[in-house]
Image: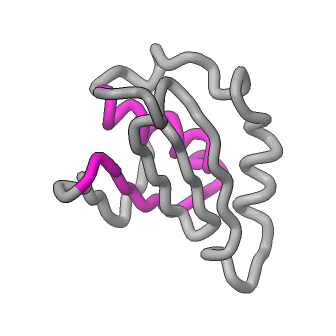
Amino acid sequence: MEGSSADSIDTGTSSDRYTRTFEFTETLTPSVAVVEAVSDVTGTDPKSSPPLHEVVDADALNGLLTESNSNPETVRVTFEYQGHEITVVGNGTVYVRPAQGNTR
């Protein structure tokens, strides 16, 4: 998606984990970052992804991870989306790996 800001990308060569760090903004919210990161892993267009709100409350996710917090690394949310286990951290890091029992 246009307007994304990635600080770093780690394709996880020693594991199946993909890591991407975003700078959350008003338009690049945690929910948008999840869809972008999963699209990177699956090689699909983010606009063709299933709605994230079918598996997690996107407004709650955005609020929880962007509210003022003196230690954003301590706020983590993990859920499954598109056959992957997603962990989003308050510091902007999104981890994507195949869900248990799901092989790529």
Left or right of 82 on screen, residue 68:
right
- Between 17 and 20, the one lying in front of the other is 17
Q: Position of residue 37 (x, y in %)?
A: 42, 42
Residue 30 against residue 55 in the figure, above or below: below
Magenta range: 15-42
Q: Considering the image in quadrants, where does the C terminus appear?
A: top left
Q: Quadrant of the N terminus?
A: top left
Residue 25 in the figure: left or right of residue 85: right
Residue shown at 78% from the left, 74% from the top:
68
65 lies above or below 68: above
Viewer-closest of 67 and 76: 76
Looking at the image, the residue that sits furthest to the left is: 13
Q: Which residue: 47% across, 35% down?
A: 99
Number of numbered discs = 0
Spot occupied by residue 31 in the image (x, y as percentages of width and height): 62, 41
Q: Residue at x 74, y 37 (%)?
A: 58
Where residue 72 appears, as percent x and y from the top left, is: 66, 75
Please name whichever residue, 46 or 74, is drawn nearer the observer in this view of the structure: 74
Residue 39 shown in magenta: yes
Image-quadrant location for residue 65: bottom right
Residue at 38 percent across and 56 percent down: it is 20
Residue 63 in percent (x, y) is at 80, 54
